[in-house]
Amino acid sequence: MTSAVLIDTDPGIDDAVALGLAARLPALAIVGVTTCHGNTDVGRATRNAREVARRVGLDAAITSGASAPLRRAAHPARETHGDEGLGYWIPDEAPRAERDRAAEAIAEATLANHGLTLVCLGPLTNIARALGEFDHVA
């Protein structure tokens, strides 16, 4: 039996490895991936998540999310994860700006997948904002 999971992540090096490993676990059914600021900016995080998904054959929606924390400035960990978020490796694709839809995607996945497990690998900004989405559900 598989468990439905949604992974909320800020792919720097560590989260890229975790996402790749999770994609290969037969016990997990990854129903979505949402990205957030953190180890790198959200544009690079989203691009990095898509690159990892492509390389490991993960077929799940990847949705861009929060570009900054709710109450302070963002502080990417470039000293650890490099300018692009994946150490010294430079992806072929440039990051691009996308609409922030992570909170909606998390709320929708939660409603569509009874018993969904949220796997939170980065800042919890998207999760906090998703909780607000449930105020609209009656």
Image (tube, rainbow, N blue to C red):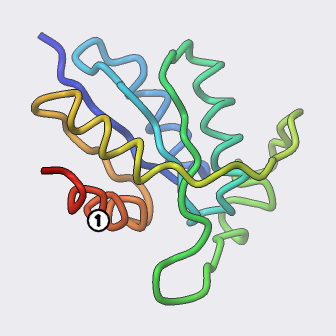
Q: Is residue 122 left or right of residue 41?
A: left
Name the residue that disc number 1 marks.
Answer: 132
Q: Amino acid at mark 1?
A: Gly
Q: Position of residue 133 (x, y in %)?
A: 30, 57
SS label for mark 1: helix
> Which of 103/36 is in front?
103
> Which of 103/117 is in front?
103
Q: Position of residue 125 (x, y in %)?
A: 42, 67
Q: Is residue 31 positioned above or below 47 on the image?
A: above
Q: Residue at x 37, y 65 (%)?
A: 129
> Which of 5/13 is in front?
5
Q: Is residue 2 left or right of residue 127?
A: left
Q: Position of residue 106 (x, y in %)?
A: 35, 45
Residue 134: name its quadrant.
bottom left
Q: Is residue 86 positioned above or below 57 on the image?
A: below
Q: Residues within 10 Å of mark 1 (few under 14, many from 20)?
A: few
Q: Residue at x 48, y 44 (%)?
A: 34
Q: In the rendered picture of this protein, how many numbered marks are placed on residues?
A: 1
